[in-house]
Amino acid sequence: MRSLLAVLKSRRLLAVTLLGFSSGLPLALTGATLQAWMKTEGVDLTVIGLFSLVGMPYGFKFVWAPLMDRFVPPLFGRRRGWILLMQLALAVSIAALAFSQPAKAPAATAFIAVLACFFSASQDIAIDAYRSDVLEKDELGPGAAFSTGGYRMAMLVSGSVALIMADHVSWPVVYCTMAAAMGVGIAATFFAPEPRVAPAPPRSLQEAVAHPFSEFFKRTGSLEMLAFILLYKVDVVMATALMTPFILELGFSKTDIGAVSKSVGMIATIVGALAGGALMVRLGVKRSLWTFGLFQGVSTIAFMLLAHVGHHYPTMVVSIAAENFCSGMGTAAFQAFLMNICDKRFTATQYALFSSMFALTRTIGAAPTGFIVKALGWQAFFLVCIVAMIPGLLLLTRYDRWTRPEIA
């Protein structure tokens, strides 16, 4: 096994970090930042609310992922070729948003935003597949961590930095600048290395559609793996689902929440992911899932303490930092696991399927939280969240049955 320093020097890690930045950049530009622009233009709140629907392509990316497994663009190979095409399309669509008129022509703005989301979701498919294909086994943890760090930094740029810029320059200038920032990812695609072993693509579209699913469900423990994907981070989803109402109920201001979640929380997530990635070089995937899963569950004790002490600013800061740090570690291990269980012939489709399954966790885990809080109160609710980590960890006892030799 290579040393941590040797792993961190890998050109592949730099590539996936910058591609993570490219993946994270468009999200706020079609979400919160676009909403801020519309609000300053006097667009009705009902219209702004409806604009949340432009993000629907992210939830259905597994539908067209087989096309990106089957067909190979003429330049840069199967993975990098699709990444480059989607990056160029994103740069054009973000620039087009700059010249849209949200107040006068909201339908046209929405159409462009939907296109941007489609290209962004497609870029995610290709980048996820590339990351799974190119990283060596001992690079999976650091690769997941560095990719998460790049993604979060991009969210800061297209979110916080873009909003600060909007106080000094026009919105079209902001969006043109963000379109130019896609150049970071485009440059990364040019120098990113190809996988050492590049499996042949599916021979037909039918094979690209059917075989990723049949291959996965023929494995021993496939249903257990899907259950694990659904449950591993459900405790985190539950604990954070009502975080803003919880903090407000304790008497903190919206400024307090924004400052801590956007600065301390974001930094803690990045540091946690990087720390988790570094530790995974020694621990491996299985032990990391166990260790970080326990950490992310137990960290919710900090919120129980905050619910007990009430309006206490240092406790609030420590609680959010601890949860984000431990969740970042868990995310690094979880993403490494997802990459590791993909069949490299169908990485785009299988990773899209797994990430779509995890998206269900955010819906299923968050839905009952309000009822639980009303019935039990905040302290007991956070205890329930801690207990919710147990099913996912119990499924880890079946890990050795999951039959791809790479995941051992």
Image (cartoon, helix red, strand yellow):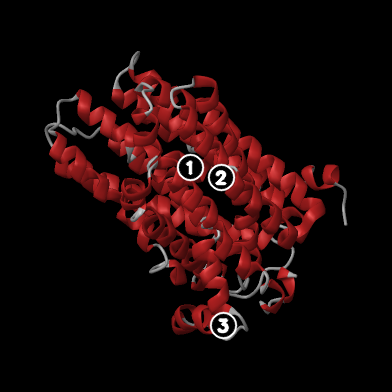
Indicate the position of residue 187 as horizontal and vertical percent values: 58, 41
Q: Which residue has dot 2 on it?
A: 20
Pointer 2 local density, CA inside 10 Å: few below 14, some 14–19, many at least 20:
many
Mark 2 to mark 1 CA distance (whole Å): 6 Å
* SS state under label 2: helix
Taking the image as drawn, is residue 225 in sight?
yes
Pointer 3 local density, CA inside 10 Å: few below 14, some 14–19, many at least 20:
some
Q: Quadrant of residue 150?
A: top right
Indicate the position of residue 162 as horizontal and vertical percent values: 40, 25
Kind of residue at disc 3: Glu
Q: Which residue has dot 1 on it?
A: 24
The quadrant in which the C terminus is found is bottom right
Taking the image as drawn, is residue 16 in sight?
no
The disc label shown at residue 351, or none: none
In this rendering, position of residue 10 left or right of residue 392: right
* Above or below 178: residue 384: below
Measuring 48% from the left and 82% from the top, which residue is drawn there? 204
